[in-house]
Structure formats: structure tokens, C-alpha cells
């Protein structure tokens, strides 16, 4: 079962979960087409976060909390390093979420390494 579930999350194009580079997320944000969901805990989010990111901590994450994604927009999950957003994506898929989920590679570490802006 884990292979079936996580196989769709590996970023290999299967299922509705895909890995994307932080630079791609930055392009989507600049174009106004990204809906960014930060699944880190509230303290982590408070210390630094991507502007306008919605905080849905993994510890309390429910697929029903995922915002509606209008046509033409991209849903992006991220965390600190890219692991927890995979768990959140798995929870969403397991709960029956049908929309596309994009996981940002490297999480906030990757974002900040490429010079992405944060709110502190």
C-alpha cells in the first residue's frame, strides 16, 4: 500500500502529485498563479515564511482545509526540507483529494538557497 500511495508522490509524473523546483514556484508566485501552502508548524512559519503562504501545519493537517484552486492556478505544498510536504500530500491523496499538488523541492531550505524572499 505504501508503494502505491507514495509511488504517486515521487515526482515521476504519476498521479496528481509532482515535484517542482523552487525557481518554478518563484515564477508562479511572480505570475500570481501559485497558491502556496506551508505545512510547517506555527512557530516555524512565524519565524520565516513565503509571502501570502497559507499555514496548514502537518500536525493538524486535513485535506478539507486545502483552499479551492481556481482554474489556471497551481497548488504548492512546502515545508522546511521537502519531507513533511510529502506527508501532507499523501494525506490529501489518501483522503480523496483529486486536484494537482506540487511539492517544492528542498522546501524552505531550497527556497532560501536560491534567494527566495521570506517574511520574518
Image (cartoon, rainbow, N blue to C red):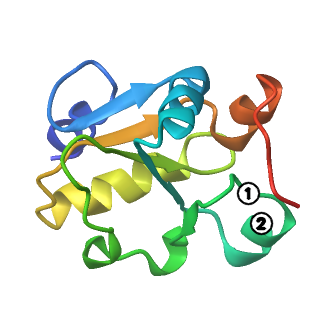
Quadrant where the C terminus sits is bottom right
Looking at the picture, tell me which residue is in the foreground, 98 or 93: 98
State the image coordinates of residue 57 (x, y, percent, origin top left). 55, 72
The answer to whether residue 46 is left or right of residue 88 is right
Check the image and report above or below for 85 versus 65: above
- Measure the C-alpha gap from mark 2 to mark 1: 8 Å
Check the image and report above or below for 43 versus 6: below
The answer to whether residue 79 is left or right of residue 108 is left
- Badge 2 element: helix
- Residue 102's tag is none
> Mark 2 Cα within 10 Å, few/some/many (few <14, many 20+)?
some
State the image coordinates of residue 108 (x, y, percent, origin top left). 71, 42
State the image coordinates of residue 45 (x, y, percent, origin top left). 73, 66
Residue appearing at x 48%, y 50% in the figure = 85
Residue appearing at x 79%, y 75% in the figure = 43
Mark 1 = which residue? 49
- Badge 1 element: loop
* Mark 2 vs 1, N-terminal side: 2
> Mark 1 Cα within 10 Å, few/some/many (few <14, many 20+)?
many
Check the image and report above or below for 7 versus 119: above
Residue appearing at x 26%, y 57% in the figure = 69
Looking at the picture, tell me which residue is in the foreground, 83 or 118: 118
The answer to whether residue 98 is left or right of residue 100 is left
**Mark 2 against mark 1, which lies toward the viewer?**
1
Residue appearing at x 33%, y 24% in the figure = 11
Check the image and report above or below for 6 versus 77: above
Quadrant position of residue 13? top left
- Residue 44's tag is 2
Amino acid at each position: 500500500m505504501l508503494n502505491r500511495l507514495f509511488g504517486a508522490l515521487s515526482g515521476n509524473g504519476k498521479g496528481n502529485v509532482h515535484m517542482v523546483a523552487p525557481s518554478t514556484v518563484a515564477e508562479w508566485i511572480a505570475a500570481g498563479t501559485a497558491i502556496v501552502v506551508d505545512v510547517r508548524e506555527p512557530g516555524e512559519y512565524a519565524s520565516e515564511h513565503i509571502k501570502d503562504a497559507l499555514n496548514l501545519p502537518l500536525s493538524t493537517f486535513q485535506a478539507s482545509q486545502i483552499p479551492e484552486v481556481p482554474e489556471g492556478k497551481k497548488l504548492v505544498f512546502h515545508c522546511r526540507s521537502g519531507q513533511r510536504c510529502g506527508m501532507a500530500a499523501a494525506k490529501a491523496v489518501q483522503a480523496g483529494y483529486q486536484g494537482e499538488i506540487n511539492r517544492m523541492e528542498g522546501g524552505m531550505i531550497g527556497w532560501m538557497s536560491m534567494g527566495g524572499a521570506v517574511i520574518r
